[in-house]
Structure formats: C-alpha cells, structure tokens
Image: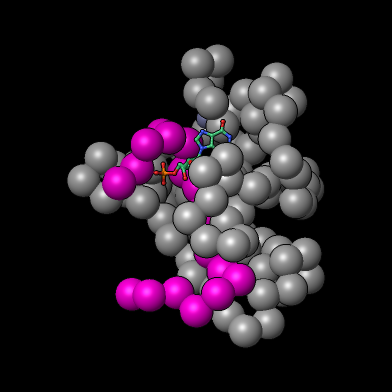
Amino acid sequence: MSDCLFCKIANGDTPCNKVYEDEDFLAFHDIHPKAPTHVLVIPKFHLPTLADATEQDVALLGLMMDRVRHIADKELHLDAGYRVVINVREGGGQEVFHIHTHILGGKKLPF
Ligand code: 5GP
Ligand code: ZN
C-alpha cells in the first residue's frame, strides 16, 4: 500500500528507530511514547485492522504475538512486565490503518 505510513516504514522509505526486524515483522519505537518503553510491532504484510483479519491471517496473528513476547523479553528486557494493546478501528483509538501491536512498559502502568 503506497499511501500507508507503516508500509513505508516496513520497506525503508520512511525512517524509524528500529528495535527488531525479521523476514515478516518489524518493531520500532513509537514517535509519541505513552510509557517509558513504547514499541510498535508490525507485520510487513498490509492488513488494515484486526477486524479485517480472516482465517488466512490466523498464522500471522499468532506469529505476531510470538514476536511480541520475544521482543519484550530479549530486546526490551521488560522483566517486570508489560502491556500489549491492539487498537481496532476509530472507536478503539486506531490512527494508523496497518495492524500493529503496542508494547508498553518500563513503569507500573495504571489501568
Ligand atoms: P494507533 O493509535 O493506530 O493504535 O497507534 C499508532 C501509533 O503510531 C501512535 O501511538 C503514534 O504515536 C505512532 N506513530 C504515528 N506516526 C508515527 C511515525 O511516523 N513514526 C513512529 N515511529 N510512530 C508513529
Ligand atoms: Zn500498510
């Protein structure tokens, strides 16, 4: 998707502060962090929202959670714990319509 911000970050056209990358996923620091550590994990594949996922995306969603666990543990060392958030559509607070998982940590988070 040529007009998608996170596709541009995924293909290197737009810079990011990278935390982790593999063949299918990229993780980078959020530009407006809402916690001491705030990282976004995105698939390189363009899927607008969780609500758009189908049976065909089940493996991708499972892999994304596995990468979240790996990144929080091995890259960010959030040993005390962290929060995982996926905002879905406008009503859920989603602003960038390329599915992504927020990892928030680094302090005790209020509800
Ligand atoms: P959403 O509200 O869609 O779940 O989250 C989008 C997130 O992307 C927001 O937390 C916002 O701060 C972040 N963001 C928006 N534009 C950029 C950008 O250009 N670079 C980075 N690193 N993060 C961005
Ligand atoms: Zn995209």
**Picture quadrant where residue 69 is located:** bottom right
Query: In the image, is 37 to the left or to the right of 17?
Result: left
Query: In the image, is 78 to the left or to the right of 33?
Result: right
Image location (x, y in percent) of residue 77: 74, 73
Q: Is residue 61 visible?
A: no
Indicate yes or no whether the magenta region holds residue 69: no
Image location (x, y in percent) of residue 103: 55, 61
Residue most toward the top?
2
**Closer to the camera in the image, 22 or 59:** 22
Image location (x, y in percent) of residue 46: 52, 33
**Secondary structure, magenta segment, majority class:** loop
**Picture quadrant where residue 75 is located:** bottom right
| Quadrant of the image containing the C terminus | bottom left
Marks counted in the figure total: 0
Residue drawn 41% across and 55% down? Answer: 86
Q: Is residue 74 visible?
A: yes
Question: Against 13, is 15 above or below?
Answer: below
Residue drawn 57% across and 69% down? Answer: 105
**Closer to the camera in the image, 48 or 102:** 102
Indicate yes or no whether the magenta region holds residue 101: yes
Residue drawn 37% across and 36% down? Answer: 95
Colouring used for the render: one colour
**Closer to the camera in the image, 75 or 60:** 75
Image location (x, y in percent) of residue 72: 67, 68
Residue drawn 25% across and 40% down? Answer: 90
**Picture quadrant where residue 26 is located:** top right
Query: In the image, is 103 to the left or to the right of 94?
Result: right
Residue most toward the bottom?
80
**Closer to the camera in the image, 46 or 8:** 8
Q: Which residues are magenta?
A: 93-111
